[in-house]
Image (tube, helix red, strand yellow):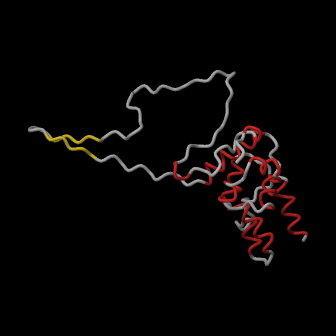
Amino acid sequence: GRMRASVRLLVASGADVHVRNNDGQTALRVVKQSVRTDVIELLAFMSESPVSKALVRANVTGEIILNFFDSAIVTPEDALGVRDEDLVRLGLVESRERTFVIAAFYEELIPDEEPAEPAEPVVAATPKTTKTTRRPRRGRSHSPHKKTKTRSPHQNHSVSPPKRAKSRSPPELDLLAPSSDRVKT
């Protein structure tokens, strides 16, 4: 209907679905009071879905986000299963755009690893005093001078998805490689 077409036009044009009216309600809240389930689904995806949040984080246009919705790529599982060719079909024609989207999917859709347990205090007893110290956490540098790498402005800045635990590795690790470089199985 016209309402769905209007909402799609606004979203494709970059309208913020989180804006509130004078009564403090978002568009989704207002539409939920109606029986327009098609518009409710669209606005719920745009405002609450981790997939759309990842796409917004990657600076994807509203029109492309609608392409994900129309293609039923609405759950984290759907998004993490998207191949490079699918991203091109959805409107992400530049390799750099696809790289940013994949990185945003990994950041937004994969739960963080279990938080590290706090260091346990170690009590060292001496005849005169009792001293409590903390064990250093694994993997951290204890040097007071942290070394940082500097890049020359001429070096290529590439973005890759964050490293994941081995138990959660994706079925296909070469999502970012051009399709001509992929190993066919």
Depicted 159 relative to depicted 29: above or below: above
Q: Which of 29 and 40 is in front in this view?
A: 40
Q: Residue at x 41, y 36 (%)?
A: 140
Q: Residue at x 55, y 55 (%)?
A: 111
Q: Which residue lies furthest to the right in this view?
A: 2
Residue drawn at 23 percent across, 42 percent down? 132
- Between 140 and 5, the residue placed more toward the observer is 140
Give the quadrant of the N terminus. bottom right
105 vs 125, left or right, is right
Question: Nearest the camera: 166 or 64?
Answer: 166
Residue 82 picture location, percent across and down: 72, 53
Residue 15: x percent and y percent?
80, 55
Most extreme residue toward the bottom is: 35
- Where does the image place residue 134, in percent across and percent down from the top left? 29, 41
* Count of numbered marks: 0
Residue 68 spot, x, y in % from top left: 77, 57
At x 38% / y 40%, what residue is drawn?
138
Q: Is residue 182 left or right of residue 136?
A: right
- Indicate the quadrant where residue 175 lies: top right
For residue 31, what is the image quadrant? bottom right
Q: Is residue 40 left or right of residue 107?
A: right
Q: Is residue 115 above or below residue 157?
A: below
Give the farthest residue toward the front.
Answer: 185
